[in-house]
Amino acid sequence: MSMTMSAAIFKPATTQFPAAAFPTTTLSRPSFITCSSSTTTTFQTPSLSTTTADRLFNFAAGPATLPESVLLKAQSELYNWRGSGMSVMEMSHRGKEFLSIIQKAESDLRTLLNIPSDYSVLFLQGGATTQFAAIPLNICKPDDVVDFVVTGSWCDKAFKEANKYCKPKSIWSGKSEKYTKIPSFDLLEQTPGARYLHICANETIHGVEFKDYPTPINENEVLVADMSSNFCSKPVDVSRFGVIYAGAQKNVGPSGVTIVIIKSDLIGNAQPITPVMLDYKIHADNNSLYNTPPCYGIYMCGLVFEDLIAQGGLSEVEKKNIKKAGILYNAIDESKGFYRCPVEKNVRSLMNVPFTLAKSELEAEFIKEAAKEKMVQLKGHRSVGGMRASIYNAMPLAGVEKLVAFMKDFQAKHD
Ligand SMILES: Cc1ncc(COP(=O)(O)O)c(C=O)c1O
């Protein structure tokens, strides 16, 4: 087979990153590569003809939009990571290059969330869904009771999975009110002796978000939070939690990386049936390198963490998120009922904004017309219908402003 490969034309990206752990080398343009054999195939390597103007505003709930500066940085480093002669995708996870990447990612995450030194940070695989099993397996005995505040479908899933490994109890459920509320903490009847209290800090499908956190009543009980869809969207006092876990693919990276922040003294008591891949002690003892980790995903998370630090940290990020969400919720609330958000005002999510149209027959048209204007993935989750705009950290203000302008236009045409 004869193959002529024209190599990609690399355009070094300008980014706002602080000095990297490894010196950034100037990207040289690779020369043409020719492989010869009997048949001829031409592999046309794409050149970088795409620009910001070609990108959509992606309102998907996850995998979701990533910061443009991060994508450009990753692009510039894809072929030859900082002079290593390799892509991050090709590196040994035990080599010094990748070790520097994962260590920097952890240290930046610790800086961002101000994670106390007696907490371990694990970069795992399997998604947040795997943690629904891993958490009870690691911190409960089979007869332990654990309390769940079921504020939406994700917490309900975690509750059902925990049922296989401990004795979960739903101490509050918002199901009868279509998951539009978060209870007052005084009303929670927590179980004496419960091992942990589980919450989902932000329900991605229903758009309800805890603005504060309940305190477990028992002495040795810990608070466990699924923060998949609001991880690193605002400062969090980590010391209030025993475990925080998050799939990366909403706010801090691509799919394939799950981050677990756990108080170190909770590690080491896993049930005997715990698979090795779910055993936090194995991962903590091996610095998340017991087996091959999702290296490229961890690298991307690291770039996102650098970007969040460069923005001024999570207090600054939160301000931007409050502003974006405020613009969108105001547009909904001021539409005189044309648009409606079902969620109680004081617990509305800064990240996932569900809304419906009074004239529900127009919803499909809304989604179609928005897509024509380069605003995509606005369809609500199949279980709730309507629309949902996910406006994670990386959604620019311009994206929200464009959506709001579109909504006003759409209303003027159809009201
Ligand atoms: C709040 C929440 N928890 C858990 C999950 C499951 O995550 P994963 O797909 O990483 O297993 C999701 C996915 O959307 C989510 O939004």
Image (cartoon, rainbow, N blue to C red):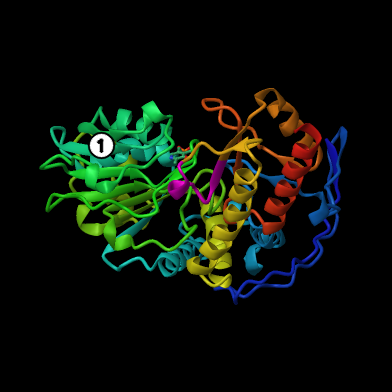
Whether residue 284 is visible, yes or no, is: yes
Q: Where's the C terminus, which quadrant?
A: top right
Crowding near the residue tagged with mark 1, few <14, some 14–19, many ≥20 C-alpha atoms within 10 Å: some
237 relative to 306 in the view: left or right = left
What's the magenta region? 344-353
- Please identify the quarter of the rendering in which residue 111 is found: bottom left
226 relative to 414 in the view: left or right = left
Q: Nearer the viewer, residue 340 or 311?
A: 340
Q: Is residue 163 above or below residue 311?
A: above
49 relative to 66 in the view: left or right = right
Residue at image point 74% right, 69% down:
14
368 relative to 343 in the view: left or right = right
Q: Is residue 187 magenta?
A: no
The residue under label 1 is: 274
Q: What is the x, y in percent for residue 197?
A: 24, 44
Q: Secondary structure at mark 1?
A: loop
The residue type indicated by label 1 comes to Thr
- Please identify the quarter of the rendering in which residue 339 is found: top right
Q: Where's the N terminus, which quadrant?
A: top right
Q: Residue furthest top?
A: 361
Q: Nearer the viewer, residue 403 or 133?
A: 403
Residue at image point 63% right, 29% down:
358
Residue at image point 68% right, 45% down:
58
Q: What is the x, y in percent for residue 172?
A: 28, 35
